[in-house]
Image: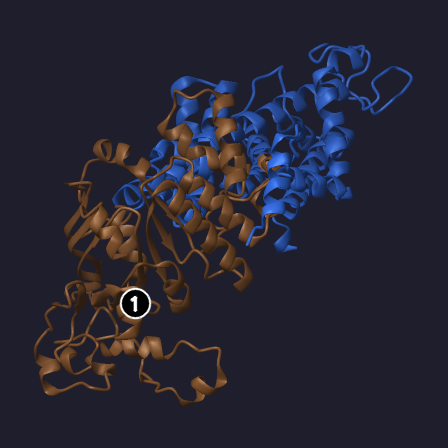
Chain colours: A blue, B brown
Amino acid sequence: MMNKDQKTAMLQAAGAPGEIEGRSLWRDARIRLFRNKAAVGSMIILAIITLMAIFAPLLSPFAYDQIDWGYIQEGPNWENGHILGTDGNGRDIFIRILYGARVSLAVGLLATAVSLVIGVTYGAVAGYFGGRIDNIMMRFVDVLYSLPFMFFVIMLMVVFGRNIFLIFVALGAVEWLTMARIVRGQTLSLRRREFIEAAHATGVSNFKIIFRHIIPNVLGPVIVYMTLTIPQVILTESFLSFLGLGVQEPLTSWGVLISEGAKVIEAATWMLIYPAIFLALTLFCFNFIGDGLRDALDPKDR
Amino acid sequence: MNAIRKKKNVPILSVRDLKVHFSLPGKGFFGPERKLKAVDGINFDLFPGETLGIVGESGCGKSTLGRAILQLIPPTDGQVVWLGRDIVGAPHREMQPLRRDLQIIFQDPLASLNPRMTIGEIIAEPLVTHKPELGKDEIKARVKRMMARVGLLPQMINRYPHEFSGGQCQRIGIARAMILEPKLIICDEPVSALDVSIQAQIVNLLQELQREFDLSLIFISHDLSIVRHICHRILVLYLGNLMELADRDSIYAAPKHPYTKALISAVPIPDPEIERTKERIVLTGDLPSPINPPSGCVFRTRCPFAKDVCATDVPSVDTINDQHQVACHFHERM
């Protein structure tokens, strides 16, 4: 029972200005994430690599396609400026790694973004409507899953020619399948929850229920999966470049650099080791961030 | 109660022969499809300003009935007449404006609130949906007014559901249901997840709101003492079938159905003398499966008074003493 005193106190308080800010689940997760040392360290390292990639031309006296005739396939040397050595064509490895980072990170982020948008929308729609719609949509995903990925990419390359943009499309087109499955599974368990039913009872449209109630609640697993997709995409791009299906010379990516380095591993180890260090470091960082996010977003699972 | 009916004897809601059957896949690969009869032919009227209690044990179809009235679960058959028109199978476009007057409050207070939205957004959602012409400030003002009305501090408007206790969450749920000033709220066990002391607060709040807004309530519960406190009439449900429907006083004073008798005799009385000596009807066995309900009277397998006729004939719903309905072959002898 609420007595008169409480009620008047409440009414007075109602007139008083100033609203108390709530702590959203996102904010709680952010605080937990920033307490995770591995994740914070990884974020710093990734930020440094990203900044280096963005400001690459300022960090080195050489251009990425500039041939230094005096130093063909020379080891690291601080005095002549080739701090990580040069490749078989006399091009500076350091600047080429940074330009490779541009391509690799861009592929990773863009392809993941493509998969995120398609996968989340597709999965949420399939899971929310359920029944026959769900069946048809998910069987379509199964069919795409069963297509051999390499065959798909080679077909694209043959038909449209080698093109960095095509790599985004190809990778995004494959990665969204898993995303759609994850989101669908989460949506299936969400759509019977009472707050969804309350929205129904009020007459909120399906479109708004999906975007206002379902997607914000499936974002946790989605973000975690996303941070794990980025390294996967970077690796796949490296693999495609390794096979010669990736970016075109003189532009480069980490995969291309590693592939070139692997050919001369006995004569010029630096050509393999340094790009490999950058690639491995980036992949580690994304995985640590993914782990940190998982713990931060779902503290029950620890 | 009778006063209410004399004043306004046009029912706001009439449920006629309402059925909700779920299809289940048959046993084995080629088995015939089976039917789960969650609600099987329910009739009742609800009058403005009235509270109708729906009681019964777990799995008897109480919640399904409530959701079928709101068309959240499409009924298989029958009519739900809301303000003179049948809304069963009404297309979305026609249903939309009616939803403004039909709201629901849930059992689990926290699960019924979206954890990613502030309570201001949660309470405002019906307003935003049905009155898009309102400005932001007007919506916020109305939300704050409603928060104060249900006993929440309006400064809490930017907080999130997990920052509130169960009772406060239920108040948020009530505020969301009340913000459009509906005519009917279906309360699906609104207090069974709460402490006893909080239960009383929530029930009293519902009663205050009912008086203030001339609200009709359908109060689904298995707690007979709360139902007795809040409801004007009570409908007893067993396995999707109506057992008894009567005014609160007559049902507690003179239950005519053996199931109602058993339910009422199970309510503890806070007086050890009476408690020790009172007659108690203990039901044996479990609720039969609604996939394969007993023949004749669905209650006969657990009824202490069952005779042969109960297995063969479905009892008709008889009206006795004007407003007392009961479905039992032997109600005269009870």
Q: Quadrant of residue B27?
A: bottom left
Disc 1: which chain?
A: B
Question: Does residue A270 appear in this view?
Answer: yes
Quarter of the image that includes the N terminus of chain A: bottom right
Looking at the image, residue B61 sits to the left or right of residue A241; the answer is left
**Residue at position x 18%, y 52% from top?**
B15
* In the image, residue B106 above or below residue B39: above
Looking at the image, residue A103 sits to the left or right of residue B11; the answer is right
Q: Nearer the viewer, residue B218 or A209?
A: B218
The single residue placed furthest to the bottom in the displayed view is B277
* In the image, residue B292 above or below residue A291: below
* In the image, residue A8 above or below residue B242: above
Where does the image place residue A232, in percent across and percent down from the top left?
Answer: 57, 37
Quarter of the image that includes the C terminus of chain A: bottom right
The residue indicated by pointer 1 is B249
Give amino acid for label 1. Answer: Asp
